[in-house]
Image (tube, grey):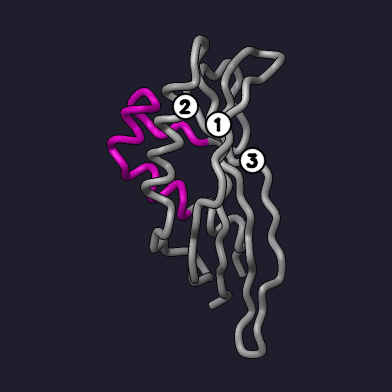
Amino acid sequence: MTSPVLALRRAIVDVASGDAELRALMGGSLRLYDEPPRGAEPVYALFGDVKAEDWSTDLDRGHAQSVDVVIWSEKGGARTALMVADRFFAILDDASLTLDGHRLVNLRVTELTSVRDKDSGLARVSLNLRAVTEVL
């Protein structure tokens, strides 16, 4: 069985990589990583914190996930990172994604936050997603 967390991440990458507007905002390609590549220049996004909880019923095994997607801005402003976050919101909120080994019951963007990182001075915009999945 595929992990529900990994299945959701793969589906997010698949749908995001197919979005031309998102790719253009990120410099021409999808720059969504598990960890920032060495020397990566913003704008890029990372999969952040995740929490998966049992959401099983008497009939189906399932999970509720809270997933963060964190977008790092270029120096000098949060505008581009906020535009990238808005695009992620548009393609992910209430999306019908295909997951390996799981069925997506729902996917919602529950929160957007923007803060300035004290160490780098870059703006960091976070989207929190809530997903409910069932094991196939």
Q: Position of residue 10 (x, y in %)?
A: 50, 52
Within the magenta stretch, is there residue 15?
yes
Element on which disc 1 rests: strand
Query: Distance of mark 2 from mark 1, alpha carbons?
Result: 6 Å
Mark earlier in primary sequence (1, 3): 3
Instruction: Identify the residue under disc 3.
Output: 48
Q: Are marks 2 and 1 in contact (CB under 8 Å)?
A: yes
Q: Are marks 3 and 2 in contact (CB under 8 Å)?
A: no
Element on which disc 2 rests: helix
Amino acid type at circle 3 is Gly
Mark nearest the camera among 1 and 3 is 1
Q: Position of residue 16 (x, y in %)?
A: 39, 44
Amino acid type at circle 1 is Val
Q: What's the residue at 55%, 51% (across, down)?
A: 110
Q: What's the residue at 62%, 26% (across, down)?
A: 115
Query: Distance of mark 3 from mark 2, alpha carbons?
Result: 15 Å
Give the extent of the magenta segment: 11-32
Element on which disc 3 rests: strand
Instruction: Identify the residue under disc 2.
Output: 81
Amino acid type at circle 2 is Ala
Q: Position of residue 97 (x, y in %)?
A: 41, 61
Instruction: Identify the residue under disc 1.
Output: 125
